[in-house]
Amino acid sequence: MTLYGFEVPCGRNQLAASRRKKIFDIIAPYVMSQEDIDAVAERTQYVRDIWLESMANAVRTMLYSKLQTRTKDFLRRFFPSNGLLPTKKHAAMIGLPPNTSILDR
């Protein structure tokens, strides 16, 4: 989300697929074990593309459904800079210096 804001890459074209992969590559180390990441890598490109597309569609549903208000409140609470940087407290929890994005790594 930091890369594209509310423009979730849900399309079936190559650009959207590459954006989803970029997002996955950034987020995966924070939420998945190395074993899980390896399991994803072992699948065919077709299966990985479908899985990442379903992830993007789930995110879009959260952002544009009745949960939209709650989702925006959540983002504002934990990422007050419009989704770019986590709060100092939450950055410290994942080992980031203040005013730093995971993209800065």
Image (cartoon, rainbow, N blue to C red):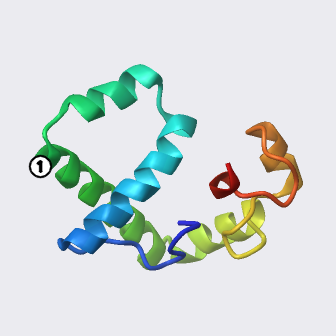
Residue 66 makes an appearance in the image: no
Which residue position is annotated with label 1? Answer: 46
Q: Which amino acid is tagged 1?
A: Tyr
Among the 4 quarters of the image, the one containing residue 70: bottom right
52 on left or right of 100: left
Q: Which residue shows up at 54% across the image and 69% down it?
A: 3
Q: Which residue shows up at 20% across the image and 53% down it?
A: 49
Report x, y in % for residue 96. Answer: 79, 45
Q: Residues within 10 Å of mark 1 (few under 14, many from 20)?
A: few
Among the 4 quarters of the image, the one containing residue 2: bottom right
Report x, y in % for residue 65. Answer: 41, 76
**The furthest residue to the top:** 35
34 on left or right of 98: left
Q: Which residue shows up at 11% across the image and 49% down it?
A: 46
Is 17 drawn above or below residue 34 in the view shown?
Answer: below
Q: Which secondary structure, mark 1?
A: helix
Is 29 drawn above or below residue 54 in the view shown?
Answer: above
Q: How many marks?
A: 1
Q: Which residue shows up at 37% across the image and 69% down it?
A: 61
**The furthest residue to the front:** 105
Residue 68 makes an appearance in the image: yes
Q: Nearer the viewer, residue 1 or 19?
A: 19
Report x, y in % for residue 55. Answer: 33, 55
